[in-house]
Structures are given as C-alpha cells and as structure tokens.
Amino acid sequence: MILVKKLVKRFGPLTVLRELDFSVAEGEFVALLGPNGAGKTTLLRILATLSRPTSGLVRIASYQLTQAGPELRAQLGVVSHQPLLYGDLTARENLIFYGKLYGISQERIQEVLELVGLGSRQDDLVRTYSRGMQQRLAIGRAILHNPKILLLDEPHTGLDQEAGEILDRVLQEVALEGRTVVMTSHDLVRAASLATRIDLLSRGKITASTPAQGLSSGDLVDFYRTALAGGRGKA
C-alpha cells in the first residue's frame, strides 16, 4: 500500500531524510518511533502529500507521489499535532462541512460520531470540548470518507490517561476495519499495544523493524536502544 525507496528530503543545507526505505502492506498498523528531530513528521507530511521529497520514489495506493492529485488524497485520512477543527461549529457541523468535499451522507456522519464516542455531544460547540474529545473528532473527520490509509502524527500528545485510553479504543476499532495505518509516537508501550509492527527512525533512516505482538516492555527498551545505537534488522 505504501512503498518508499531512497527517499531524501533536504531543507536548505539540512538533510532530514537520508535515502530512506519504508514499506507498509495493506491492513498493517505501523508505529513509527524515534527521537525528536529524527524525521518522523517530515516523512508523514510527505506521505500525506503536504511536502515534496527532494529525491526518491514514493508510491501510495498505486499512485506515484509526484504524479498524484485529488485521486490520491481521497485515499488518505490525516491527523496532525493540531486537530484543525472549527471551534465555533458543532461536531456534527464540522463533519458536514468536511463531508461536502466527498458527498458524505448524513447516515455516515452519524455512524462516525457514534464510533468516536461523540454521539451525545454532537451538537455542542467544539471549542467546549476537551483535548481528548477534539482528537477523537479529528480522527472521525479523517475516516469520514472511508480512506484506505490513515496517517497519525502523535495523536496522543497532550492527552491525560483517561482520554488516551478512549483514543486507543477508537484506534483499535479503526484498525479492525482493515485500514492501513502509520502512526508516529514516543510511547513504546502504547505503540506496541496498538500496532502490528514497530519501525524506528533515527538519523533520517529506518534503523530497525520488529513485529509488535508479544513484545514485553523490556524487549521494547532493548529494541529501541539497539536501534538508536545503529543496529539494523529485526529484534
């Protein structure tokens, strides 16, 4: 579903991604971990068509990035650090506004509001929502048009424990629908509980990859430390 080969991204003299190779199969949930400045957000922005690579091949859902347009964007759902919602509209009005881009039915909007647990608050202004509720609505907006691929940039940032657990349940339900998911995170344990695979990005490259299922917290720490030290391969 996602194929990246020898991807390079430079910002002036600074090289952020260094001939990066990365692939995700249909239906996989990949957690992308790494230290600050490793290039996680840059990679997600390129996959979301929000930034152009300096060089390299990026193919998403059979579309080559340099030749893609609205057809590819219709296959993507994106959640960034900011929820990017209209605070003076209700949750339902936000989804109606976005849904007009894709001709989404009222039935689908109601279905998504219930999925993200906001059915009882759908007529409240979004500016009255907690950070966790806004993140759930942002995910609802991202999946509203049934995209094949969901790209999540640290969706748990700023959430308390209860809000984080609610968001986890939403993401698990989204994954069960068979979507392909790439999520950046700094939380090893949470990433392992949600994802089917963990990749570590360090110094502009994927330095290690491991299946997430069955990993203990000790295994996760060892994997992370080894990868940061420059190891390559599977834990």
Image (cartoon, rainbow, N blue to C red):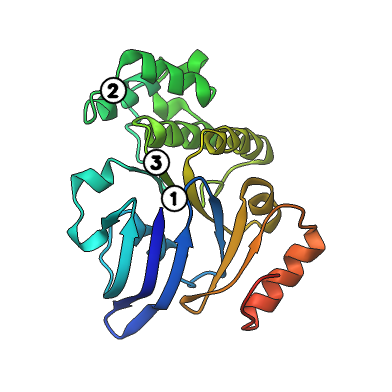
Relative vertical location of residue 136 with respect to residue 13 in this rendering, above or below: above
Callout 1 secondary element: loop
The total number of labels drawn is 3
Q: Amino acid at mark 2?
A: Ile
Q: Which residue in the structure is indicated by mark 2? A: 104
Left or right, 40 with respect to 189, comes to: left
What residue is drawn where x is 41% and y is 29%?
Answer: 127
For the C terminus, the image quarter is bottom right
Residue toward you, 208 or 120: 208
Percent coordinates x, y for residue 59 in the rendering? 32, 60
Q: Earlier in the sequence, mark 3 or mark 2?
A: 2
Residue toward you, 205 or 127: 205
Q: Which residue in the structure is indicated by mark 1? A: 81
Relative vertical location of residue 46 with respect to residue 106 in this rendering, above or below: below
The residues tagged by marks 1 and 2 sit, at their Cα atoms, a distance apart of 25 Å
**Which-is-in-front pick, marks 3 and 2?**
3
What residue is drawn where x is 45% and y is 36%?
Answer: 139
Q: Earlier in the sequence, mark 3 or mark 1?
A: 1
Callout 2 secondary element: loop
Percent coordinates x, y for residue 38 in the rendering? 49, 72
What residue is drawn where x is 61% and y is 83%?
Answer: 230
Q: Amino acid at mark 3?
A: Lys
Callout 3 secondary element: loop
User: Residues at badges 3 and 2 in contact (C-beta under 8 Å)?
Assistant: no
Q: Which residue in the structure is indicated by mark 3? A: 148
Q: Residues within 10 Å of mark 2 (few under 14, many from 20)?
A: some
Q: Residue furthest bottom?
A: 13
Percent coordinates x, y for residue 189 in the rendering? 71, 54
The residues tagged by marks 3 and 2 sit, at their Cα atoms, a distance apart of 16 Å
**Which-is-in-front pick, marks 3 and 1?**
3
The residues tagged by marks 3 and 1 sit, at their Cα atoms, a distance apart of 21 Å
